Image (tube, rainbow, N blue to C red):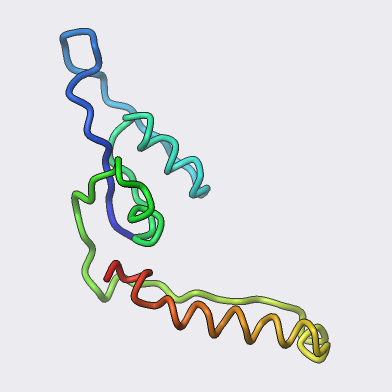
Amino acid sequence: MEYWVIHQPGNGSGGTAPPQCLRSNNLVNHLQAVKAGIGVGTLPRIEGDRHPDLQLCITMMEDASQPIWIVMRRDARKDKAVSALADLVIERVRAMRHAFAGA
């Protein structure tokens, strides 16, 4: 994850804004909070790169990466359609590896 911030010159009151905190495990909440100017937030690189109004402010070390999992029931993998879809998703994610890394 990298840290992103939206540039906003001030809060309009002439003073500094009070510290605020948002805790959420929802990516949409993090994105909307950063875009609203609440402050710095963590977003996957691939998501932050999609928003030109956000500025990357702290990059993480490469060893901070996390695996991506595809999860399904064991018996579902035997279904040809489910298996084909899973294989396609895996293939596409692997092909987009550079985008996840911010290349």
Of 68 and 21, nearer the camera is 68
**Residue appearing at x 44%, y 37% in the figure:** 32
Q: Quadrant of the C terminus?
A: bottom left
**Residue appearing at x 37%, y 69% in the figure:** 100
Residue 75 locus on image (x, y percent): 82, 86
**Residue appearing at x 22%, y 34% in the figure:** 7
Placement of 66 over or under 2, stated as above or below:
below
Residue 95 locus on image (x, y percent): 45, 82
Placement of 34 over or under 92, stated as above or below:
above
Task: Tell me where residue 17 sits by quadrant.
Answer: top left
Q: Quadrant of the N terminus?
A: bottom left
Residue 46 locus on image (x, y percent): 38, 61
Q: Is 96 displayed left or right of 26 in the figure?
A: left
Task: Tell me where residue 97 sits by quadrant.
Answer: bottom left
Q: Is 38 displayed left or right of 26 in the figure?
A: left
State the residue lying farthest toward the top.
13
Residue 18 locus on image (x, y percent): 26, 19
How many numbered callouts?
0
Placement of 81 over or under 52, stated as above or below:
below
**Residue appearing at x 31%, y 71% in the figure:** 101
Placement of 58 over or under 12, stated as above or below:
below
